[in-house]
Image (cartoon, helix red, strand yellow):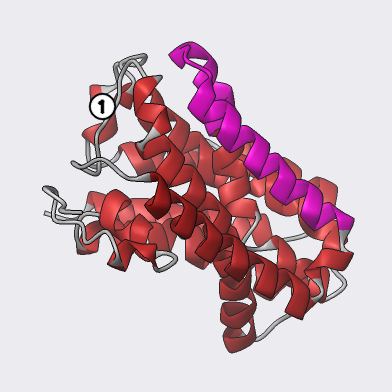
């Protein structure tokens, strides 16, 4: 199987490398993902579970490995089956994927997911299994519903779960599962909101040329402060405000880039 887009199909069988090859195009994309998803996740684990930095990194990436195993199956669905149903489709592969490849791709990821769930004991936590089932259901809906106007609901849910699921195992394994709603609410305003704007524009359902202006991301994040303070007040947890401050700093730093 040859890739006209520079993707090495068999290398992409390795979990996470498919995401790297199809969703990230250069150092800037990797950095953006790290500072807007990974760092906030670790901040939440540090403050909600009272972990040290190294322990937060470890717990986050254990959760991330389980999450990405499921999420990349959704990516492949989107790049194959989803292309036939999306009116504003984007061909990220440049080649046809055979059924045998899809089967092997899925088996590798399901095996990794099950290995993590079994060895860590996550399978004993119904909340985690429900969240994973919800992710699978919304991925299926996103790639089978043809109406683009209905995909915004599935995209928003996928985005929230994308933020939440790498963090949730670290909370559960430390007996802090009750903080899950704090993470979910933080994810809605600090992670999913800006991504929903980008998604709507990519589907030609929103014209927002100002989104590309240097100060836009800082200003739009700054305006979510009332919601973030509400989360802080209701939960008596400072972590959402620290995540918000970090993302404002990231937006400010990006605005000052030449």
- Mark 1, Cα crowd under 10 Å, few <14 / some 14-19 / many 20+, is few
37 left or right, relative to 13? right
Magenta extent? 126-155
Residue 100 coordinates in the image, percent (x, y): 41, 52
Which image quarter holds the C terminus?
A: bottom left
**SS class of the residue under badge 1?**
helix
Tell how many labels.
Answer: 1
Q: Residue at x 67, y 73 (%)?
A: 116
Residue 211 can be seen, yes or no: yes
Q: Residue at x 30, y 19 (%)?
A: 88
* Residue 173 colored in magenta in the image: no
Viewer-closest of 106 and 68: 106
The x, y position of residue 76, in whole percent, is 41, 45
Residue 85 drawn above or below residue 243: above
Report the residue at 88% width, 66% height from top.
124
Q: In the image, is residue 122 above or below residue 127? A: below
Query: To which quarter of the image does residue 45 belong?
Result: bottom right
Whether residue 189 is visible to the viewer of this picture, yes or no, is: no
Near-viewer residue (248 or 103): 103
Position of 61 compared to 210: left or right?
right
In the rendered image, residue 11, in percent from the top left (x then y), is placed at: 29, 68
User: Camera-side residue: 74 or 170?
Assistant: 74
Q: Which residue is mark 1?
A: 210
């Amino acid at each position: 199987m040859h890739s006209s887009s520079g993707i090495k199909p068999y290398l992409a069988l390795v979990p996470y490398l498919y995401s790297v090859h199809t969703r990230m195009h250069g150092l800037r994309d990797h950095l953006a993902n790290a500072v807007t998803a990974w760092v906030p996740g670790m901040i939440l684990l540090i403050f909600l579970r009272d972990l040290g930095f190294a322990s937060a990194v470890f717990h986050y990436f254990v959760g991330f490995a389980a999450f990405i195993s499921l999420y990349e199956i959704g990516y492949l669905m989107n790049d194959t089956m989803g292309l036939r149903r999306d009116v504003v489709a984007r061909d990220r592969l440049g080649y046809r994927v055979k059924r045998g490849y899809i089967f092997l791709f899925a088996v590798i990821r399901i095996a990794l997911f099950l290995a993590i769930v079994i060895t860590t004991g996550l399978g004993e936590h119904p909340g985690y299994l429900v969240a994973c089932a919800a992710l699978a259901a919304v991925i299926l809906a996103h790639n089978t519903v043809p109406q683009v106007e209905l995909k915004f609901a599935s995209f928003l849910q996928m985005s929230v779960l994308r933020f939440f699921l790498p963090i949730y195992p670290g909370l559960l394994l430390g007996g802090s599962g009750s903080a899950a709603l704090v993470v979910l609410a933080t994810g809605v305003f600090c992670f999913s909101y800006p991504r929903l704007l980008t998604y709507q524009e990519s589907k030609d359902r929103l014209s927002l040329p100002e989104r590309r202006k240097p100060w836009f991301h800082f200003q739009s994040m700054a305006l979510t402060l009332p919601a973030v303070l509400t989360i802080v007040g209701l939960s008596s947890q400072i972590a959402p405000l620290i995540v918000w401050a970090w993302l404002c700093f990231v937006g400010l730093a990006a605005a000052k880039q030449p």
